[in-house]
């Protein structure tokens, strides 16, 4: 029965990771704010920054992959690929979070030496939603690291861990 | 049992040992080059900032990597990954016989995976900020930096190329580590099963 609980735990983890990646994707896509000052209307949406577009694409890929792996039958031979693909998805997630965070940090604090002014003062709701998407992406990353360790443990014979 | 020891005396098949060593050396070179080139990236230029009447006012501006937190993270993460590779190369060369002991192969595989994720985060974070520096961003009204500080941007470009080759190499290193782990576990499980089955 320990095997069944382990397998159910892994399925729950993957469902949670799918949910987190999907949430990050949706929150980033729906972040849009229109601000106007001095009769100039400025709209901030996620397509303005290449890093946010990459974040959306990466989380979409991760969500689709998680959804497909949820339905993988237990005895399939593809589980060996799941380890390497899980590693690839983790790298994709870390890179998308890092890119979006770097650009969002410039948007919030600006860069005095380059003459880049922060934009969060003008579009605060957009900044908040981007922050929320980043948090969801970070949760997805943590869940994926746990999933990676679990996949490694299940593909590689657990015998290895009992030997000393 | 003796047959298993001979098979695994070199730490798995010696072919995978050599491949792993070569990949690690390349990854060490790539990440170290990225860290050093970006760490020494600095350009000072005297630019005309404003003109009062007919007198141009000059100011000396310096572009250095410490201005951008993404580049600071880039340097630190690449230094960490190259140190990890150096450590693993040393372990691989000098304690070749002890590879079967305990959790060693498992911890090497896990550390390789974590470092692959770290270097991919560093490279991508830096490349998107560098893209803003190169092309500017009309929507946020951020103007480009590369037309004035071209040497800074060239060095940054070189460091980013080195880091991305480091990312691909670290992915290959983790894949080889994982396959070595699974080869060893298969061998040990079959040999132990044989030992149990033949009393």
Image (tube, coloured by chain):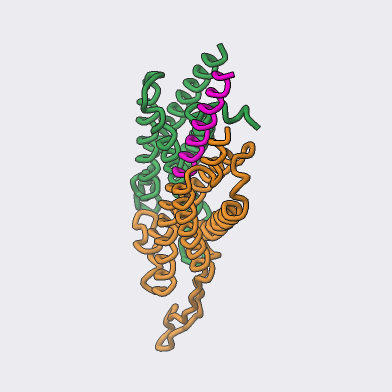
Chain colours: A green, B orange
Name the image quarter holding residue B150: bottom left
Residue B22 place in picture, x, y as percent: 46, 56
Where is residue B51 shown, x and y percent of the image? 42, 82
Asked whether residue A163 appears in the rendered view, the answer is: yes
**Whole-percent x and y of residue A159?**
57, 26
Q: Residue at x 41, y 31 (%)?
A: A80
Please name whichever residue, B91 or B63, is drawn nearer the observer in this view of the structure: B91
The residue range painted magenta reads B173-199
Percent of width and height locating residue B8: 54, 41
- Which residue is pictured at 63% across the width and 39% down the height? B101
Is residue A6 left or right of A33 when viewed as pictured? right
Q: Main secondary structure of the magenta part?
A: helix
Front residue of A65 and B134 = A65
Q: Residue furthest bottom?
A: B54
User: In the rendered image of this protein, does residue A55 appear above or below residue B86?
Assistant: above
Instruction: State the residue in front, A153 or B124.
Output: A153
Say if B94 sits above or below A2 in the image.
Answer: below
């Amino acid at each position: 029965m320990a095997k069944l609980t382990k397998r159910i735990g892994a399925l729950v983890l993957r469902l949670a990771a799918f949910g987190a990646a999907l949430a990050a994707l949706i929150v980033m896509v729906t972040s849009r704010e229109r601000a106007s000052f001095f009769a100039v209307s400025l709209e901030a949406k996620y397509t303005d920054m290449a890093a946010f577009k990459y974040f959306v694409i990466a989380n979409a890929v991760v969500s689709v992959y998680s959804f497909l792996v949820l339905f993988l039958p237990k005895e399939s031979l593809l589980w060996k690929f799941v380890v390497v693909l899980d590693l690839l998805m983790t790298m994709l997630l870390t890179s998308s979070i890092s890119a979006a965070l770097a650009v969002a940090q410039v948007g919030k604090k600006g860069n005095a030496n380059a003459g880049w002014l922060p934009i969060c003062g003008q579009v605060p709701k957009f900044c908040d939603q981007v922050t929320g998407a980043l948090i969801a992406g970070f949760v997805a990353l943590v869940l994926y690291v746990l999933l990676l360790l679990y996949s490694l443990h299940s593909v590689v014979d657990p015998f290895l861990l009992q030997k000393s | 049992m003796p047959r298993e020891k001979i098979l695994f005396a070199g730490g798995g098949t010696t072919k995978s040992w050599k491949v792993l060593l070569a990949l690690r050396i390349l990854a060490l070179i790539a990440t170290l080059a990225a860290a050093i080139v970006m760490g020494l990236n600095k350009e000072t230029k005297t630019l005309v900032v404003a003109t009062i009447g007919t007198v141009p006012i000059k100011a000396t501006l310096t572009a250095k990597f410490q201005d951008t937190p993404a580049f600071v993270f880039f340097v630190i993460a690449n230094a960490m990954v190259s140190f990890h590779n150096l450590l693993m190369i040393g372990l691989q060369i000098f304690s070749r016989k002890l590879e079967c002991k305990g959790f060693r192969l498992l911890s090497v595989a896990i550390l390789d995976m974590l470092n692959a994720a770290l270097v991919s985060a560093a490279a991508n974070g830096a490349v998107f900020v560098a893209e803003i520096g190169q092309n500017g961003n009309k929507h946020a009204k951020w103007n480009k930096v590369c037309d004035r500080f071209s040497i800074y941007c060239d060095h940054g470009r070189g460091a980013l190329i080195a880091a991305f080759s480091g990312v691909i190499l670290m992915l290959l290193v983790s894949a080889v580590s994982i396959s070595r782990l699974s080869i060893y576990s298969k061998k040990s499980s079959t040999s132990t099963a044989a030992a149990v089955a033949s009393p």
